[in-house]
Amino acid sequence: MTARGKEAAALALHRFGCGPAGGSIAAIAGDPQGALLADLERPQAGLVTANLPSSGEAIRAIFEFRAEQQAKQKLDQRAKKLAEANKAPNQNEAMNPQPMQPPQPAQPPLPQQLIQNEAKVRFDAAIGADTGFVERLVWFWSNHFCISADKIPAMAGPYEREAIRPHVLGRFADLLQTAESHPGMLFYLDNVQSMGADSVAGINRDKGLNENLAREIFELHTLGVRSGYTQADVTSFANVITGWTWIQPAEPGHGGEFVFAKRLHQPGAQTVLGKRYPDNGVEQGRAVLADLARHPATAHHIAQKLARHFVADEPPPSLVAKLEKTFKDTGGDLKALAKTLVAADESWTPQRGKLKPPSAWLVAMLRLTGTHPDNAIGRVLGAQATLGEALWRPPAPNGYPDTAAAWIDGVPHRLDIANEYAGRVAANTEPLALLDSALGPLASADTRRTIALAESRVQALTLLVMSPEFLRS
C-alpha cells in the first residue's frame, strides 16, 4: 500500500466509501484498511424499513391508486355532463355562495411518494455509515443488476432492498438467482410477456418467446460480451426461463409476486453453452443460472467491473487477476472479493483518476456537512437527475456508466448545485475546518489557498466541494 496514515484514510473514504464525515479521516488513520474490512463484518441491519412496503405491496397499492384515479375522473366527467344539462343555477346557491376553501398543500402522487420514501432510507444509510464501503457495494451491485423506475416505479426501491442488499456480502450465485427471479427484473426485461411457442399459453394465444432477459443475463450480468455464447444459446436460455413471471398486480392478495407458470413454459430439454438441461420446471432455469455463476467468463467480467468501479477506469490487469482468482477460488464469495479489493496494493495508488458520479458526489457533500435530506429529498433527487444520474432510472439495462468520460461534461452543472447547496448550509459551517475533514492531506496547496481567499463562506464551501480533490476518488 503506497499511501499511509491520514492520506490513506482520506483515500479510503473517497475511493471505497461514501466520503469523509466529521473527524472520520483522523478516526481511521491508524488502520484505513482495517476500517474498511470492519465495515464488511458489521451487521448490515441499519435500514429503517418499518414503513416501507414490499415490492408486491407497493405495486398493488399503485394499481389501486390508479384505478381510483380513473374512477374519480369518470365521476368528474359525469358530474360535468349533469351540470351542463342543468344550466339553470340554483337560486339558494346563487344567493348564498359557498365560502372558498383554502388550497391544500400539494402532495406528490403515490408512485412518487413511494420512490421518495425509499430514496430517503437509501440516502440516510449512506450518510450515517461509518465508512460507507458496504453502501457503495450495494450501489455497485444495484447498478450491475439494474431495473428502472421509469418502467416499474413501484419496485425500484423494494427491488434493491429485497434482491440486492441482502446478498452483497454473500455468494454471487445467490445474488444472481434472487435478482433474475425478482418480479421487478422479470417485468423490466419483459420476461412476463415471454412464453414458449409450444407451451399451452403459446399455442392458445399464438404468442412466443421474448429473449431480452436471457440476452442481458449473458451479456451484462454474468459472462460479458464476446465471451463465447451464441444466438442459439440465447434462444435456448430464453426458452428455459419461460414461465418465470408474476401474479398480475390486480390480484389483491399476492399481485406482483413471483410465480412459475407451467402453462407458459416451453416443454422439453434445452442445451445452453453445450450442456443439456432436462425439463424440470423452474429448476431448469435455476440450474442454468448456477452454472453461469461459476463460469470462468463470469469471474473475469465481475472482477473487471469491480476494479473499474472502485480503482481506475482502466484498472491494473494484476488487480483484475487477483479478484478473478478470488472469485474462482471461493465460488463467488462476494465478501472475500471485497476483502481482496481492499488488500491489494494496486487499489491504493495515490493517482486519483476516477471522477465521482453525481450520486457519490452528492452523498459526499451531505456527509461532509452532516446534512440529512429529510423533507428535502425531492430537491436531492432533482439535483441527481439534473446531473444525469436519476436514482433508479438508468437509460438502458447496462446501468449507468462507470468512467470519467461519461460524467466529465456534466461537471460545470455541479457548480450551480454546489452554490445553491452552500447557500443553504454555509452559515452553520466553517469551510477551512471542513477542508481538513473533507480532504486532509489530499488537499493541494492551490486548493487550500483558493478556499482561504474566498470572499464568503458560501463561496468557500462551493470551492471546496468543486475542488479536483473532492470531485475525484
Image (cartoon, rainbow, N blue to C red):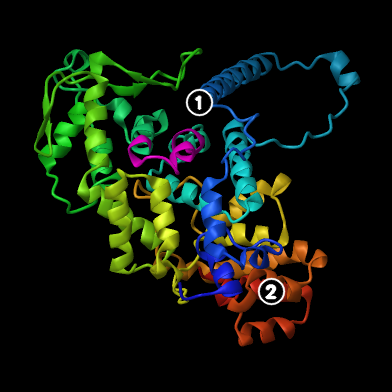
- Residue 359 in view here: no
Residue shown at the point (48%, 33%) measured from the top left: 162
Magenta-span inclusion, residue 69:
no
Query: Percent position (x, y) of residue 431?
Result: 74, 73
Query: Percent position (x, y) of residue 396?
Result: 36, 48
Q: Which amino acid does label 1 sit on?
A: Ile
For residue 321, what is the image quadrant? bottom left
Residue shown at the point (12%, 44%) measured from the top left: 230
Query: Percent position (x, y) of residue 4?
Result: 54, 74
Magenta-span inclusion, residue 162:
yes
Residue where numbered disc 1 is placed: 59
Judge by depth and name the residue closer to the eye, 108 or 318: 318
Residue where numbered disc 2 is placed: 436
Q: Is residue 292 above or below residue 261?
A: below
Q: Is residue 339 above or below residue 122?
A: below
Q: What element carries label 2?
A: helix
Q: In this view, does 334 lie above or below 389?
A: above
Marks 1/2 in contact by CB < 8 Å: the verdict is: no
Q: Earlier in the sequence, mark 1 or mark 2?
A: 1
**Which image quarter holds the N terminus?**
bottom left
Q: Residues within 10 Å of mark 2 (few under 14, many from 20)?
A: some
For residue 211, what is the image quadrant? top left
Q: Which region is colored magenta?
A: 160-174
